[in-house]
C-alpha cells in the first residue's frame, strides 16, 4: 500500500491528513496519509530515507521547509527561488522537492474571485517570512508590478529586495497610509490574528476602496482583519482555501490523480477547524 505523510514539529494541528484521506477515499485509491512528528535534527535523515521506504512522498510544514530544501536530491525552479520545500516526492529512486504555497494562494484567489486580474496591480504584503516569499513570487509571476512590504525587521525586507528586485518596496510607518491608499491587494502572511494569539494592528481606513484583502491564517476561518475588511466593503479571501489548493499538486505527484477543491471538502475541513475552536 502506498503511503504519504506530513512532517513537522509539532504536527498535531495539521489538517493535511483530513484533506488527503478525503481525496484518497473519493478516488478509490488504496493508500494512506498520516502525520509524522519529526524533530528538526532528524529531517534530513527522514527525507533521504523516503527513497527506500513505502512512502511516495510527504508534505513539509513549520519549521522544516528550509531543512527539506537542503535535504532533497533535486529541486525545481520554484523551490530554488524560495529556498524552501513544502512538497517532497520520489521519482525513479530520487527524492525531489517543490513548493506549492504560491500556486495554492493564486488558485484559491481564482476560485473565490474568478473575475480578479492581478496584471499591473499593486500589492501590500504584511510579513517577510517563507509564506511571504512564496506569495510574492507568485504575485510577480501573475504580473503584479509593485509589492510593498510591512515587516518589523528591516533586514528581511532588504533580503526580499535582493531576491526579487526593484518591485519590492519597503513600507515604514510614515509611508503606510499612502501605500494602502494605492494597493489593489492586501495580504497578511504573518501569524498575527491567529486563534488565541496577538491581533494584527492595522488601520484600514486608508485602504483603497475595492482592494481585495487576504489572510493566510485559517484558524479562525475569518480573522479580525477579514471581518473589518468586509465591514468596509472589501472582497476578502481566507486562508483555508490556500491550504486546500496547495495540497493539490502533491496528491497528483504521489497518486497520479489531480483532485478538486470542492465545497464539500472546504466544509469538511472548516467544520474541523470550528470544532477545534470549541474544544
Image (spheres, rainbow, N blue to C red):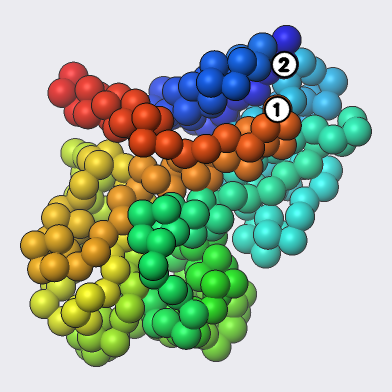
Residue 49: name its quadrant.
top right
Q: Position of residue 262 (x, y in %)?
A: 42, 36
Q: Are marks 2 and 1 in contact (CB under 8 Å)?
A: yes
Q: Secondary structure at mark 1?
A: helix
Q: Is residue 67 visible?
A: no
User: Which mark, residue 56?
Assistant: none
- The answer to whether residue 127 is above or below residue 62 is below
Relative horizontal placement of residue 73, taking residue 253 as reference (left or right): right
Q: Position of residue 97 (x, y in %)?
A: 72, 44
- The residue beneath circle 2 is 2
Please identify, in this view, whether the residue under mark 2 or under mark 1 is nearer the observer.
Answer: 1
Q: Position of residue 69 (x, y in %)?
A: 69, 48
Q: Residue at x 63, y 37 (%)?
A: 258
Q: Is residue 279 visible?
A: yes
- The answer to whether residue 201 is above or below residue 266 is below
In depth, the one of 120 and 44 nearer the eye is 120
- The residue beneath circle 1 is 255
Amino acid at each position: 500500500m502506498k503511503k504519504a505523510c506530513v512532517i513537522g514539529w509539532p504536527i498535531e494541528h495539521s489538517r493535511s491528513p483530513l484533506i488527503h484521506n478525503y481525496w484518497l477515499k473519493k478516488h478509490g485509491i488504496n493508500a494512506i496519509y498520516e502525520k509524522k512528528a519529526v524533530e528538526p535534527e532528524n529531517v534530513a535523515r527522514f527525507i533521504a530515507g523516503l527513497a527506500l521506504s513505502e512512502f511516495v512522498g510527504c508534505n513539509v510544514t513549520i519549521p522544516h521547509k528550509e531543512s527539506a530544501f537542503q535535504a532533497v536530491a533535486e529541486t525545481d525552479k520554484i523551490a530554488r527561488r524560495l529556498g524552501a520545500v513544502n512538497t517532497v516526492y520520489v521519482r525513479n529512486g530520487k527524492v525531489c522537492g517543490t513548493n506549492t504555497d504560491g500556486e495554492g494562494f493564486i488558485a484559491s484567489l481564482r476560485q473565490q474571485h474568478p473575475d480578479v486580474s492581478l496584471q499591473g496591480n499593486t500589492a501590500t504584503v504584511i510579513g517577510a517570512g517563507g509564506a511571504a516569499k512564496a506569495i510574492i513570487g507568485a504575485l510577480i509571476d501573475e504580473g503584479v508590478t509593485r509589492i510593498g512590504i510591512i515587516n518589523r525587521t528591516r533586514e528581511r525586507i532588504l533580503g526580499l529586495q535582493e531576491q526579487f528586485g526593484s518591485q519590492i518596496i519597503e513600507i515604514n510607518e510614515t509611508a503606510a497610509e499612502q501605500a494602502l491608499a494605492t494597493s489593489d491587494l492586501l495580504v497578511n502572511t504573518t501569524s498575527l490574528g491567529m486563534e488565541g494569539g496577538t491581533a494584527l494592528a492595522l488601520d484600514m481606513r486608508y485602504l483603497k476602496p475595492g482592494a481585495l484583502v487576504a489572510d493566510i491564517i485559517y484558524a479562525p476561518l475569518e480573522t479580525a482583519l477579514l471581518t473589518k475588511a468586509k465591514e468596509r466593503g472589501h472582497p476578502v479571501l481566507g486562508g483555508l482555501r490556500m491550504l486546500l489548493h496547495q495540497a493539490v499538486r502533491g496528491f497528483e505527484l504521489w497518486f497520479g490523480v489531480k483532485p478538486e477543491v470542492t465545497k464539500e471538502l472546504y466544509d469538511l475541513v472548516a467544520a474541523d477547524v470550528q470544532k477545534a475552536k470549541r474544544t
